[in-house]
Amino acid sequence: MKPMPVCAMRLDGKTMLITGAGSGIGRALAVACAEQGARLLLVGRRRAKLEETRALLARPEQAMLLAADVTQAADRRVMRNTIAETFGCLDVLVNNAGVLCVGPLHGADDDELEDLLATNLLAPMALTRDLLNLLRTAERPRIVNVGSVFGDIGHPQFAAYSATKFGLRGFSDAIRRELMAEGIGLTYVAPRATQTEAAHKFDHLVAPYAMAVDSAEVAAAQILSAIRRDARNSYARGPERFFVMLQRLFPGLIDQALGRKLPAV
Ligand SMILES: NC(=O)c1ccc[n+]([C@@H]2O[C@H](COP(=O)([O-])OP(=O)(O)OC[C@H]3O[C@@H](n4cnc5c(N)ncnc54)[C@H](OP(=O)(O)O)[C@@H]3O)[C@@H](O)[C@H]2O)c1
């Protein structure tokens, strides 16, 4: 049987909202999507960081900036109204904004745990819901949720973070099935460890756990490629893909590999 012809999604002229676009993976993705001709709404809390991102774009006038907090309902309303008034519809929503919590669970206080859940899990759900009608009016709409390899492999020292990404992956599967009959696609992307602002929190764990670390540009290229292929999910290239399979089939092996006591650092 011949393979189905793949009709790559073109981003030229498409409207995209990228959350967490003021640094790291979100910034690199904004640069890559601008090169493809997308019209961007870049969201993050720090306007100065969004300005820095815009200065890197092929054509800075392709991007609107919105200093907003994805965890706040009022800010999400402003995002929705801005898209409705400026673009009229939304082709691609990228739920990328996220925070990290690293270290043994006993070191995380309630505020940190609540912020982690609010940003990494509740906000993508709420923003997806809030923007659904604008996605519905686009021709070939797509939601992109930026998860993590740690959303498949529960990783010690990242227990609460892993839990949020497991949740995001579950939400992604469920909402994909809920929306597919309407023609709204959903891509769940799982980058591996990536050198960004947030990643400095786990610099000390890279060597002990032998983590491979990508650049933000590599992670952004992974996301862009997944969007263009209408992929249902995308896992970082490298041994992590194999570990994800191993986790599904033989989780005890992953327990043994990751459950050992860390050497003192
Ligand atoms: N780095 C890694 O190793 C890695 C690996 C796999 C997946 N990821 C995922 O990739 C995504 C991007 O992370 P990153 O590594 O690029 O980190 P990053 O450089 O810290 O970027 C995260 C961005 O999210 C924004 N943000 C955080 N909370 C927000 C909120 N409440 N409202 C609006 N914006 C908010 C931050 O900007 P403001 O502070 O200005 O709001 C920041 O620009 C996250 O979902 C992360 O979990 C990262």
Image (cartoon, grey):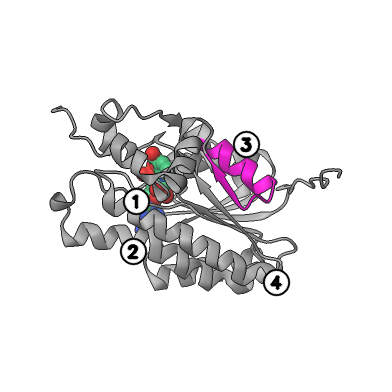
What is the quadrant of residue 1 in the picture?
Answer: top right
Label annotation for residue 162: 1
How far apart marks 2 and 4 lie (CA) works out to: 28 Å
Residue 58, numbered label:
3
Dot 4: few (<14), some (14–19), or many (≥20) neighbours within 10 Å? few
Q: Nearer the viewer, mark 1 or mark 3?
A: 1
Cα gap from disc 1 to disc 2, whole angstroms: 14 Å
Which segment did they paint magenta?
219-235
Q: Position of residue 118 (x, y in %)?
A: 33, 64
Amino acid type, label 4 = Glu
Q: Is residue 134 above or below residue 61?
A: below
Classify residue 214 as left or right of residue 265: right
Is ligand 1 closer than 8 angstroms to the Cβ of mark 2? Answer: yes
Near mark 3 (Cα within 10 A), the count class, few <14, some 14-19 or many ≥20, is some
* Image point (64%, 48%), residue name: 227
Q: Secondary structure at mark 1?
A: helix
Residue 163 showing in the rendered view: yes
Query: What residue is disc 2 on?
Result: 118
* Membership of 230 in magenta stretch: yes
Between residues 99 and 154, which one lies in front from this camera angle? 154
* Cα separation between marks 1 and 3: 35 Å
Q: Which residue is mark 4?
A: 182
User: What is the spatial separation of the Cα atoms under label 4 and label 3, in whole angstroms?
Assistant: 33 Å
- Amino acid bearing label 3: Ala
Earlier sequence position, callout 2 versus callout 4: 2
Q: Nearer the viewer, residue 111 or 72?
A: 111
Q: How far is disc 3 from disc 2 in space, using C-alphas?
A: 33 Å
**Do the numbered discs 1 and 3 sit on residues whose CB atoms are within 8 Å?**
no
> Residue 164 sits in which quadrant?
bottom left
Q: Secondary structure at mark 2?
A: helix
- Check disc 1: other Cα within 10 Å, few if <14, some if 14-19, many if 20+: many
